[in-house]
Amino acid sequence: MQKVFRRTILAEKQVARRSAKRSQKKLRDHWKNQRDQNTYHRKDEIKTIKDARFARREDYELGPLAPRRDVGDQKDSYGTVNLTRMQGRPLHGKEKWDILNFWGGKFLNIQVGDRVVILEGRDKGKIGKIKEINPKAADCMVEGLNMMDIHVPPYAISAEEQDKRPLRSVEQPISLKSIRLVTPLKDAETGVIRDVIVKEVTRGNIYFDKYGGRKWTRMIPGLNIKIPWVKQEAQTYEDYAGDTVRLDVERKTFVPSLLTPPMPSSVIDELRNRYSIFRTRHEPEYIEKKQLEEEEKLERKKLAKKMRTPLNEANRKARKERKKLGKGKLTPEMLEKIGQVIAGKRNLVMDAVGVSKEAAETVTA
């Protein structure tokens, strides 16, 4: 059984190492994709500017003889951008957080459905509703404003899609630093309600509920005027024939007690395969089977020791003969011979080092 536990621990460690390597590789691939997207966006932007300059100069020089550029291969793509360019340039680090911190940092004081005004671009001064917010790129999409023409290649149009047009107009993402919140306020003097552009928005204390939700109040600094949040429409869910009824989900079919575990043994096999190497809970029958296998291995080892082979018999006979001889004793003649050998080797060492026999005797004395 110890072998099973050891195999489980080794498998878990191996999976942890593979998971760490996989996460590191995923992070490297993510940063590589971001760099590639940034490089492509920059190159495509430079190419577009150069082509526009060349076309402008050619139109100026040729005048009425200037060629048309919205025909031929560019019939459906002239004046458009591709899908990769539409996504915009990714932001990192300080560049992104400088924009997000203006709107509250991690907890933004702006949401989908808010009315905002655009501060730059061809739609400067126009007001629209926020359609989508992307905190990773620090930008948003305003409904019906900052439109751009994109070219959708044929391979990106699915067979089920009804819109087969290669040229489409969509909202282009706008940086959050290029918009300001618009809210209706009542004039204290005239009493007329009119739209006001809010220069800065702050928030109050953040409250966390037991369900993980967060609530806070956004207000105009200095005036302490609260800006109400846009009420989001409740999400509706449709029932289908294959859905599980809530009554069946909440019905109690198993009651744990002091004698039974909090989880039925049959559920363990569904969550973890019975023969998985990562399984740490085993059935009593499986444990008993493994213990019997280990006992059988020990019995076979003991039986192998009891077995007599010609080699074992020869070794046993040699041991008995050595025991009969006993331990040898050194005779005076042997001791004298050993002393002569030691003295001879000592003289050879002294001659090799360059020390005379008289000097060595003096040092010894």
Image (cartoon, helix red, strand yellow):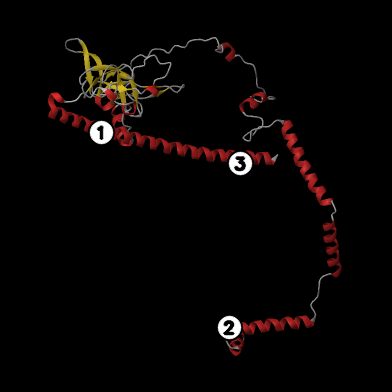
Quadrant of the snapshot with the N terminus: top right
Point 46% across, 21% down: residue: 211
CA gap between label 1 and label 2 equals 85 Å
Above or below: residue 16 compared with residue 308:
above
1 or 2: mark nearer the eye: 1
Q: Nearer the viewer, residue 248 or 151?
A: 151
Return the mark for residue 10.
3
Point 33% across, 15% down: residue: 230
| Residue that label 1 marks | 47
CA gap between label 3 and label 2 equals 58 Å
Point 54% across, 39% down: residue: 16
3 or 1: mark nearer the eye: 1
Q: Nearer the viewer, residue 23 or 179?
A: 23
The part of the image, by quadrant, that contains residue 101 is: top left
Which of the two discs, 3 and 1, labels the residue nearer the N terminus? 3
Q: Residue 254, how many percent across, how many down?
A: 65, 18
Binning the other alpha carbons within 10 Å of mark 3 as few (below 14), some (14 to 19) or many (20 upward) gives some
CA gap between label 3 and label 1 equals 55 Å
The amino acid marked with disc number 1 is Lys
Q: Residue 148, how many percent across, how many down?
A: 27, 21
Q: Is 310 placed left or right of 73 in the picture?
A: right
The amino acid marked with disc number 2 is Ala
Q: Is 288 placed left or right of 170 in the picture?
A: right
What element does badge 1 sit on?
Answer: helix
